[in-house]
Image: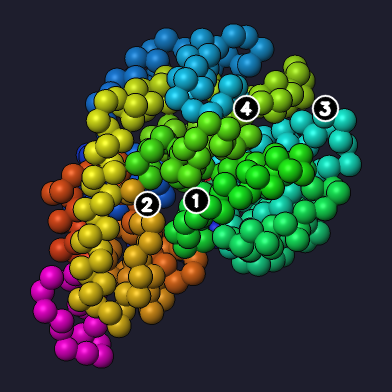
Amino acid sequence: MADSALMNTYARLDVAFDRGEGAWLMASDGRRFLDFAAGIGVNGLGHAHPALVAALTAQAGRLWHCSNNYRIPGQEAVARTLTDHSFAQTVFFCNSGAEALEAALKLARYTQKKRGQPERWRTITFEGAFHGRTLATVTAGGQPKYVNGFEPLVDGFDRARFNDLASVEAAIGPQTAAILLEPVMGEGGIRVAEAGFLRGLRTLCDRHGLLLLLDEVQTGIGRTGRLFAHEWAFDAPGLRPDIVAVAKGLGGGFPVGACLAAGDAAHAFAPGAHGTTFGGNPLAMAVAGAVLEQVLAPGFLEQVRQTGALLERRLSNLQAAFPTLMTGVRGIGLMRGLHLTIPPADLVRAAFAEGLLLVGAGDNVVRLLPPLIIGQTEVEAAMDKLFTALSTLMRVTSPLPARV
Ligand SMILES: *Cc1c(COP(=O)(O)O)cnc(C)c1O
């Protein structure tokens, strides 16, 4: 790649895909891969889903883009679907996860100013978090590998420890406006926020007049078996976030993000306060509407929960078979992580050689983020490939374990 005209921002595996179907990807050299990466949790409905192809092509023949200077009926429809099925009352559309987080962070400050508390402008975030690659969102995430070289960073972020309510309470000061976290850390290694921790944060926010911001860019739109991951913890009246960012799964592969809000945050912005050229254009809205129609269809999320439970059982069996390589299985629904004793990249490469796509993460974890449409057949096929990959890695030092 030394002669590439691309900036050197990714350590890419040497493959190029030119076709996809369901949970499978076909490479230009004829290789076939079972896709348990799904574009990092993006292709929730798999590849070339007929309903998404139909929605996109029908809209492509009518109108692509018209700017937010005009009414966009698709936005109004998708926003209504999202608010009908969530805590939220209003939605702002953008193009990516980082932009959805930028909107959420700006909205939190803006809401505090409208409350008459302009001194509250700082946000508490968590060690190991990932919120995107803009200057504000790398600062919010705070991980050295993403901020080094980009200093000076954006001011206004304080750090607490995940699942440690006391550390959050200690970080709250007179300037705190909001608390921001992922209900399940993705990039950070599939670390699940405990239900008691999330409810405790709600209580802290109520007590101190703070806004609770959730980054559901990776967990949202069915990934954990609920439309939003926070529904697992916020299952009673009064328990809700104030602002939620989504993106990845919302477009099923078409770039789209959204910032959802409730309470006074839902109505804080006025014309001119925030905006975007491309956000929520008719093409994006046609696809997002079709994605939500599938994910909200009766039985879809129940199927995700069942397949997720099966995947967890199979992964636990694998862990029992390879205890020296795999030390834990984490996650909810179809967002799973394998905690390893070897570098995650080694397993990603070994699985790739067997025709299985996985994603690395922090905290020595490999992520499994398959399309939400998979069933038992794909789970068993993935487990066979994983077994072979782990066996290859074992063979270096130890005899093979018994077949699971
Ligand atoms: C991917 C991701 C982002 C950033 O989304 P982009 O679309 O890459 O900007 C933010 N937060 C979380 C939790 C993510 O997984």
Q: Quadrant of the N terminus?
A: bottom left
- The amino acid type of the residue labelled 4 equals Ala
Q: Disc 2 to disc 4, how far (Cα)? A: 25 Å
- The amino acid type of the residue labelled 1 equals Ala
Q: Earlier in the sequence, mark 1 or mark 2?
A: 1
Q: Disc 4 to disc 1, how far (Cα)? A: 20 Å
Which residue carries the number 4 mark? 262
Proximity of marks 4 and 3: CB atoms separated by less than 8 Å: no
Residue 394 magenta-highlighted: yes
Q: Earlier in the sequence, mark 2 or mark 3?
A: 3
Q: Which mark is residue 332?
A: 2
Q: Disc 1 to disc 2, how far (Cα)? A: 12 Å
Proximity of marks 2 and 3: CB atoms separated by less than 8 Å: no
Measured from the top left, where is residue 46 in percent x and y?
A: 29, 39
Foreground tag (3 vs 1): 1
- Label 1 C-beta lies within 8 Å of the nearest ligand 1 atom: no
Residues shaded magenta: 387-404
Measured from the top left, where is residue 68 in percent x and y?
A: 63, 16
Q: Secondary structure at mark 4?
A: loop
Which residue carries the number 3 mark? 114
- Label 3 C-beta lies within 8 Å of the nearest ligand 1 atom: no
Asked which quadrant contains residue 142, the reply is: bottom right
- The amino acid type of the residue labelled 3 equals Lys
Q: Secondary structure at mark 1?
A: helix
Which residue carries the number 1 mark? 195
Residue 304 in view here: yes
Query: Between 132 and 401, which is closer to the camera in this rendering?
Result: 401
